[in-house]
Every structure is written in structure tokens, then in C-alpha cells.
């Protein structure tokens, strides 16, 4: 069946993109190796928080959207968008395995007239040096027989103020004709398309966006450690600096850097820069500072217990919030994991409450109910992620000690002699 667009990889990036394109009138097929996900998609049963089953079912029933595990369906699509993960491998080098297998599937089904767009976050040169040769192996040429471009995804799970529709889309083609054809795929589905001169510019723009965040988060994390020594409230300092209406952007200290983007994307550039004998100092320093935050926070917890004449060994510690950021259930690279492991190594007895994470099988823990008894039994309560669906007023009232790593209490006006903050 002929379709306008095929989306390869129907995860937290691919599915919302496919839904947006279908809502904009395109006929879309999602190709994903996970048959259970494709069955759920075809049944109108969403597996992605940002996509409602109602919207999905409507588009599927209208014949606008379908899921498949059959790569030959790529042949009948006019455009193919690759939205697969780009993790780091064992030695923190890029792992393009998913990108290569997706590209190989596209190459096996490539035909004249196809437009192929890479959306996955990656180092500059991936589209030209990895995808283009693979796609041209069969004899077709990018720019004349088919069209190849890069347009980095900017999906922020859970965000509602900016969506696929309203977030500007950066687009760089191997040739101008490639850029033209790729832009046409998104025209009408996204409000703004920002053309850049090459795929490399598009690849690097996305990395800059996320490196900018990791470096600035590391800056405030370093400041938090200095403020602790200087007995200055870093949260008050950040609040004050953030009153500057220009030339400043608010970042907050925390227990470390989690998620599927920030801890990973910058090291794609670090790896590529080495080819040019270039060391990305800011990225590596930020990685060190942010990577050190979990052990720094464990030392702060030990100090809180020590102030109550308690040792870490045998202390009952209740962790509030283990997801990588507020109000999501995603655990990827969450700093809660190393913090809990380090506390356990020192002999603490851990429990946690997270309204978005029912269990942590890798640690053999289930989320406990947050009630007065649970809070009172803890020698210390540690707020690692400041979810909104937590009764911080009760926590402050009933806890012996609270170490708040996110200022979840302070921003709610909750103070107490038993409360310490990062
Ligand atoms: N964090 C801090 N302090 C801050 C901001 C974040 O410690 O001031 C921590 C968070 O707790 C989390 C990690 O950093 O552990 C990453 O947080 P994030 O707000 O950057 O959220 P992400 O990882 O979901 O980043 C996504 C990215 N989106 C894409 O890559 C398309 C990022 O580019 C967005 O800027 C970000 O969402 C966003 O703005 O929400």
C-alpha cells in the first residue's frame, strides 16, 4: 500500500512524529522490530505517554497510520524518517548499531525518488559518512536518484508547551535538492523549518543544544558545592540571578544528570573531535562535575546523619523520587541509581517512594506508600527527584532529617530545622 511517510523506530521520538504527520494529512507507516508495539499501535493502544490511545485509534481507524515489522513496506513509502536510539557503547564511544541496521533496511528497499531523513542525535558526519555510502551501495545516487537529509529530533517527553508541531525543525540536506525534498515531508506538519547548509550543521546544532545544557548544569552544580563551603544558599543565588531579564538562563543544581540525552549526546562530539586531535574540554569537565554529583550527595547525606549522631551503616534512608527528572517515570541514567548503590555499599537500609516508578527491579525495591509512619521511621529522608505529586508538607513536619537535593521544599516555602538543602 502506497504511503507518504515511513517512520523507522516507533519509540518516544518516532511515534509522536508519526502521529503529527498523520494528523497533518499524511499516510504514515511505522516500522519497528518490536512486534508487540506494532500490534498495540494497530489496536490503537498507545505505549508512549505523550500519545493518547484515543488519538492513535482515530488515526489508525481512518487508515492514516499503521504499524509493521515488515521492512519491505518501506518501498511503498515516498519518504523514510529514521528515529532510532543512539546510545554510548562500553567505552563511552558512539554506538551506531541501531542507525546502521535501520539504514541497511532502508538500503534494501531503496528506490528512485525516495527521501530519507535521519532524525537520531549523532556526531557531525554521520549522515554523509555512514548513511550515504550504505544507501548508495545499490548504485542509486543521493541528490539525483534519491534524497538524503538530517533533521535532529527535539522531542521533550512530557512537555506540552512545545510539541512536534510547534518546535522549529532544523534541516540540512546532502544537496540543495535533498533539503528541498526533505523539507516538503514536514511542510504543514511542523510550523517552522530552519534550513541549514549541510547535514553536519544540523547534527552539530542538536549537540550544541544539549551540550549547552550539560555545561550550564555542571556550572551550577560546581557552584552548589562551593556555596556549601561558603555557607551561602545556592538556591537563593540562582533565584536572584534568574531575575536578570536578559543574558542569563536558569539552571538548577541537582544530584546529577539523568535521561537519554544529556549524559550521552555530548560524548558523541567528544569522540568525533578526537579525529581532529581536538579535546572538548568543556564537555569533559562538565561530565566530570555532573558525574561526581551522586557521590558528593552521598557525602552530604552522611553529614546529615552524622549531625544526628548516626552513621550511614544501619541508617534507614527513605528516598523520595528516583526518576531522572520531575513528573516522569523514566529511569534512564537516573542519578538515584548510583546514590542508592553507594549508600548500600556503606551499609544503609534503603527504601524509596516515587509516584511514577512502581519498582526498581535492578535494585530489588518497590515504591513504598508515603505515609506518616514511613516518614517517621526513616533516619533521613532524601529528595532526589522533586515530583509534584508528593506531600512535602507532611514530609517536613514528620521527618527527623530531610536532605532536599532539588529544593522541592524551599520552592514550596517549607522550612525547618530538620531540613537541609543541596
Ligand atoms: N537537570 C538539572 N538541572 C537543570 C536542568 C536539568 O540537574 O537545571 C537535570 C535533570 O534533572 C535531568 C537531566 O539534567 O536529570 C536532564 O534534564 P533535561 O531537563 O535536559 O531533560 P531531558 O534529558 O529530557 O532533555 C530533553 C532534551 N530534549 C531533546 O534532546 C530533544 C533537551 O534538549 C531539552 O532541552 C530538555 O528535554 C528540556 O528542555 O526539557
Image: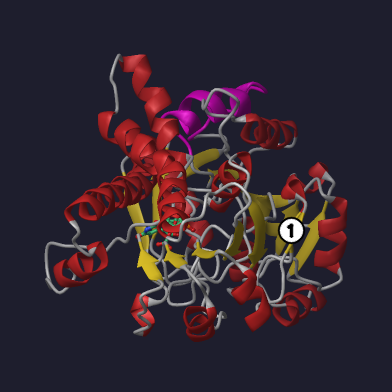
Q: Which residue is mark 1?
A: 29
Decide whether residue 141 is among the magenta residues.
yes
Decide whether residue 167 is among the magenta residues.
no
Q: Is residue 314 above or below residue 61?
A: above
Of 248 and 306, which appears nearest the observer?
A: 306
Q: Residue at x 81, y 43 (%)?
A: 72
Q: Residue at x 36, y 18 (%)?
A: 274
What secondary structure is found at the residue carrying circle 1?
strand
Of 406 and 247, which appears nearest the observer?
A: 406
Q: Is residue 273 above or below residue 410?
A: above
- Magenta segment: 122-143
**Could one spot residue 12 in this view of the protein?**
yes
Q: Residue at x 28, y 49 (%)?
A: 225
Q: Position of residue 206 (x, y in %)?
A: 39, 47
Q: Where in the image, quadrant-wise, is ligand 1 located?
A: bottom left
For disc 1, the neighbor class at 10 Å (few under 14, some 14 to 19, many from 20) is: many
Q: Residue at x 21, y 55 (%)?
A: 227
Q: Position of residue 159 (x, y in %)?
A: 49, 71
Q: Position of residue 42 (x, y in %)?
A: 84, 67
Of 136 and 331, which appears nearest the observer?
A: 331
User: Which residue sits furthest front?
Assistant: 309
Q: Is residue 401 above or below residue 31?
A: below
Amino acid at each position: 500500500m502506497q504511503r507518504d511517510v515511513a517512520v523507522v523506530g516507533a519509540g518516544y521520538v518516532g511515534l509522536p512524529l508519526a502521529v503529527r504527520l498523520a494528523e497533518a494529512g499524511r499516510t504514515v507507516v511505522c516500522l519497528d522490530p518490536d512486534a508487540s508495539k506494532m500490534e498495540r499501535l494497530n489496536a490503537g493502544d498507545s505505549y508512549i505517554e505523550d500519545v493518547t490511545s484515543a488519538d492513535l485509534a482515530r488515526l489508525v481507524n481512518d487508515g492514516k497510520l499503521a504499524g509493521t515489522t515488515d521492512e519491505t513496506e518501506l518501498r511503498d513509502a515516498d519518504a523514510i524518517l529514521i528515529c532510532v536510539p543512539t546510545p554510548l557503547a562500553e567505552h563511552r564511544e558512539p554506538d551506531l548499531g541501531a542507525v546502521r541496521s535501520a539504514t541497511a533496511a532502508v538500503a534494501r528497499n531503496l528506490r528512485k525518488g525516495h527521501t530519507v531523513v535521519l532524525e537520531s542525535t549523532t556526531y557531525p558526519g554521520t549522515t554523509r559518512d555512514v548513511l550515504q555510502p550504505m544507501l548508495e551501495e545499490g548504485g542509486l545516487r543521493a541528490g539525483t536518484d534519491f534524497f538524503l537529509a538530517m533533521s535532529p529530533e527535539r522531542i521533550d517527553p512530557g512537555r506540552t508547551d512545545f510539541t512536534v508541531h510547534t518546535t522549529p525543525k532544523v534541516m540540512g540536506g546532502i544537496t540543495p535538492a535533498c533539503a528541498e525534498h526533505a523539507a516538503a515531508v514536514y511542510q504543514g506538519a511542523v510550523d517552522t523549518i530552519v534550513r541549514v547548509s549541510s547535514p553536519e550543521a544540523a547534527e552539530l546544532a542538536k549537540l550544541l543544544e544539549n551540550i549547552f545544557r550539560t555545561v550550564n548544569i555542571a556550572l551550577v552544580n560546581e557552584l552548589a558545592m562551593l556555596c556549601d563551603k561558603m555557607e551561602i544558599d545556592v538556591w537563593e543565588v540562582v533565584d536572584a540571578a534568574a531575575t536578570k531579564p536578559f543574558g542569563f538562563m536558569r539552571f538548577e543544581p541537582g544530584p546529577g544528570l539523568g535521561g537519554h540525552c544529556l549524559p550521552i549526546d555530548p560524548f558523541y562530539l567528544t569522540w568525533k573531535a578526537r579525529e581532529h586531535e581536538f579535546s572538548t574540554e568543556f564537555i569533559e569537565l562538565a561530565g566530570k562535575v555532573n558525574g561526581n554529583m551522586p557521590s558528593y550527595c552521598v557525602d552530604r547525606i552522611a553529614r546529615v546523619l552524622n549531625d544526628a549522631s548516626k552513621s550511614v551503616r544501619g541508617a534507614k534512608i527513605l528516598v523520595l523520587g528516583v526518576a531522572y527528572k520531575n513528573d516522569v517515570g523514566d529511569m534512564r541514567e537516573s542519578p538515584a541509581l548510583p546514590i542508592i548503590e553507594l549508600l548500600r555499599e556503606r551499609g544503609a537500609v534503603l527504601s524509596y517512594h516515587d509516584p511514577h516508578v512502581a519498582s526498581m527491579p535492578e535494585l530489588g525495591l518497590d515504591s513504598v506508600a508515603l505515609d506518616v509512619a514511613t516518614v517517621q521511621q526513616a533516619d533521613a529522608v532524601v529528595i532526589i527527584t522533586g515530583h509534584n505529586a508528593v506531600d512535602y508538607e507532611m514530609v517536613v513536619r514528620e521527618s527527623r532529617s530531610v536532605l532536599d537535593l532539588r529544593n522541592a521544599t524551599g520552592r514550596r516555602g517549607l522550612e525547618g530545622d530538620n531540613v537541609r538543602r543541596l
